[in-house]
Image (tube, grey):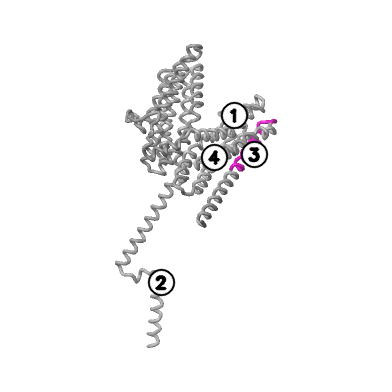
Amino acid sequence: MARLATAFATCSTAARRAFTSVFPFATVPQSDLRERLLMKIGASVQAIRLKFATLKGSVIRRGVGLLALTLPAALFNLGLSYLASRWLGAEDFGIYYAAITAINIAFAPATILNLFFTRAVATVGAEFDAQHAARASSQVFRLIVSWGAVLTALAVVGAAAIWGIAGSFALPVAIFVAVVVYLSYCSEVGRIALQGAGRFLPLGVYTIAWMSLRFAGGAIGIYFFQSVWAGLAGIAIATLIPMSVLFRPWTMFRERYFRPWSEHDDAGRRLVSLIKLRDFAKLSVGFLLFMLIAHADILAAYVLLEATQLSVYSASSVLPKGMLVATLPLIQLVFPLIVGEKASARPTITLVVRGAVLTLAVAGAGALVITALSEPLCSGPHGIASCDSMVMRYGLISIIAMCLLRLAISVDYAARNDWVPFLLMAPIVIAGPALSASATSSPLALGQSYALFSAATLAAYSAVSIALRVYRIFVARVQASERNAA
């Protein structure tokens, strides 16, 4: 019996140890157990909050949200042109479309202006705080409002003088074209302010509000007055609304214009140092070279192809070139983030990689959708006339490379490497005509050549840009080691 009792006690002890090793809380007092459970629950909740905060602040999540808000804005512009074609006569619609084309051409430099001032506002916000960034945005708004008003007045006077001499166009339409262009530039400062402050959800809301109001104002003017000038007047009035809500210009009557910044504080002096005319010129030249490369195939088609082939290539390029506009919000997202990281002396490689992944994903998904629908888009009863699906597919390959190239150029500008895009793209622009000489036979041959040219341009630019960055890092480390040795 004694041996049996000893064996039972030994087994009980072993079982208790095994149980407590698997369930350690079995030997813990209830008060300690409650505290440990609360600590674990608190740690889990904190981990979940951190995960959601990371997702909320991620480049990909913000990029998808921004695209979801800004892409429908493009549909409003197309919708207004469609309604104008239905509600206006043939002659008036021709005048309206010419006026909208003139507005789009005059507003094209807004992208360059946006990047230039966004870099300045984002830098001020990173080096100081959000309040100083908002003040810098207000100063940029007053700068554009004042000097833009002068240029608009000169344009109106010039149009009136030409009308008095020739009288071959409608003067009210020309005046409203100038006014719409002026107000559009003023309203663009709202996007600059929101981008520079990193407020991307309000940026998307502001953009879609601007375009929806523009659509409503133009549609109301055209429908009720059946005239071009009324539609343009409605667009002008509608453009005032989001801009006025954001900046409240009625509170700025006593503020300084033309030279709105104050150089008596550090933030004002920093803003002045960031908006030099030579910096704007360098950025403008680089982006104009990019636009030339991105549309080089169209220029080559005009030179190399006959009229019928030119119509095929042009029609096949409509949707691919549209993707370049559709992915522009991704640049508006990544650019100020990189500027802020650079100003704070933090590494930017993660942002660049995520921006590239997001750009590739969006452009690639768009290309896959268009490719899947290429047959009905080109040969269907409601498809694009003269479109060729194979030419379109090569155009999609080219435009993916161009979207990534634009991102690489934006990264260099965000890092204030302003001369790098010009120095790298100028030889490409010079060599472009020689590379296009082999594409004289057909639209398909031109599409293939331009796809190869686009991929080679992206690879060359990226390789040289990365090599320059590695060289700068190497030189900085050597200099740092020499200083430490001294």
Q: Looking at the image, is mark 3 or mark 2 earlier in the sequence?
A: 2
SS type, badge 4 = helix
- To which residue does mark 4 refer? 409
Q: Decide if residue 208 is on the left or right side of residue 299.
A: left
Amino acid at circle 2 = Ser
Q: Nearer the viewer, mark 4 or mark 2?
A: 4
Q: Looking at the image, is mark 1 or mark 3 earlier in the sequence?
A: 1
Mark yes or no: residue 311 visible: yes
307 vs 185, nearest the viewer: 185
In the image, residue 35 sits, relative to residue 259, either above or below, namely: below
Amino acid at circle 1 = Ala
Q: Nearer the viewer, mark 3 or mark 4?
A: 4
- Alpha-carbon span between mark 4 and mark 2: 59 Å
- To which residue does mark 3 refer? 452
- To which residue does mark 1 refer? 315
Q: Quadrant of residue 18?
A: bottom left
Q: Which mark is residue 21?
A: 2
Contact between marks 1 and 4 (CB within 8 A): the answer is no
From which residue to which does the magenta span run?
440-461
SS type, badge 2 = helix
- Alpha-carbon span between mark 3 and mark 2: 65 Å
Q: Nearer the viewer, mark 1 or mark 3?
A: 3
Amino acid at circle 4 = Ile
- As drawn, the residue found furthest toward the front would be 486
Q: Which mark is residue 168?
A: none
Q: Residue 276: x, y in percent?
A: 47, 34
Q: Quadrant of residue 238?
A: top left
